[in-house]
Image: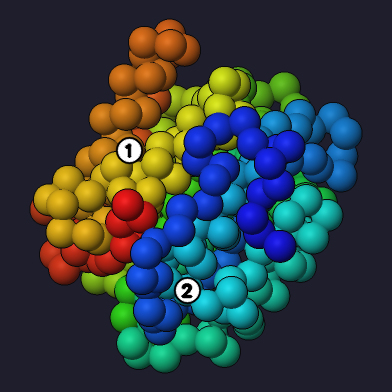
Amino acid sequence: SSDVCSSDLISEVDIVPKIRKGPKERDAVALVIGISKYRDEAIPPVRYAKRDAEIMAAYLAAVGGISRSRIKVLMDEGATLSDFSAYVEEWLPRRVSKDTTVFVYYAGHGTPNLATGKAFLLPYDGHPDFSNKLYPMDRLYEHLERLPAREVVVILDSCFSGAVGRSVLPTGARPVGIAIENPVLTSGKLAVITAASGTQISSDYEKEQHGLFTYFVLKGLRGEADIDKNGAVEMDELYEYVRKEVSDVASEELNREQTPVLYPHFEQMGTRAKIQIAIAGR
């Protein structure tokens, strides 16, 4: 069951919101991935990624209006490279029609390829020294772009700088800045919010035991991001809320810079700015 038991409650966001009349189920599907521990013990764990993914999946069902049977959660050893490719490239396409909204959430390490400047996700069985063990962001975007869906929302609590936090580097390499822009993002279908800009770290938020970015995404989905108070949380509202809260807390409490980034930028968003992410939970 997704409802977190009371002994696990650390943060108010762990209490899954209940909506009085409940959202009606929408034509939507979600793939949620959280990797806290990696097969190779040399890869540092991402402390709260698994918890982030569990709670995110519960929210997508509770306030996102997505049927539980259409939410797939991959965690830790269940999130290998072959799982990534199976669920992104086969499971999603079988569940999508022209009216479907697709959500993809990832919490775990990212890693840069220093030679090409490309960004990758690090599966459970991955290793930053071997590009064959990584899942390229380009490949993710290309497959999502190919879906016959109406719109695709990607939320990444990961970073690609190789600095500490939610990214790792090949042996002997130094941190770099990787922008995860991609031509596919001008496609008209995808909207992506990432936890941090290219050179920054995606932080953990110790006191809430979540990723800092995910913590505020969850708060936003509870209704905090419903800026116009119309009872729904839309993509542009969620981004504005999360960008402000994350950058304020990162600078005031963690003494670092972390500014979530939206792709494509506002002026290219068009109708994607109004994609409904959640029914406000209050």
33 or 89: which is nearer to us?
Answer: 33
Q: Where residue 140 sits: x, y (%)?
A: 52, 64
Q: Where residue 195 sits: x, y (%)?
A: 43, 38
Q: 125 above or below 86?
A: above
15 relative to 237 in the view: left or right: right
Q: Which residue is mark 1?
A: 242
- The image quarter in which residue 258 lies: top left
242 relative to 145 in the view: left or right: left
Q: Are marks 2 and 1 in contact (CB under 8 Å)?
A: no
Q: Where residue 171 sits: x, y (%)?
A: 75, 27
Specify how the rendered protein is coloured.
Answer: rainbow
Q: Residue at x 79, y 40 (%)?
A: 37
Q: Residue at x 66, y 59 (%)?
A: 2
Query: Can residue 50 be seen by looking at this rendering?
Result: no
The tag earlier along the polypeptide, 2 or 1, is 2
* Amino acid type, residue under disc 2 in the picture: Ile
* Amino acid type, residue under disc 1 in the picture: Val
68 relative to 186 in the view: left or right: right
For the residue labelled by badge 2, is the local secondary structure a helix, a strand or a loop?
loop
How many residues crowd around disc 2 within 10 Å: few (fewer than 14), some, or many (20 or more)?
Answer: many
- Quarter of the image with the N terminus in it: bottom right
| Residue situated furthest front in the rendering | 20
Q: Where residue 187 sits: x, y (%)?
A: 28, 70
- The image quarter in which residue 42 lies: top right
Query: Can residue 214 be seen by looking at this rendering?
Result: yes
Q: Which residue is mark 2?
A: 66
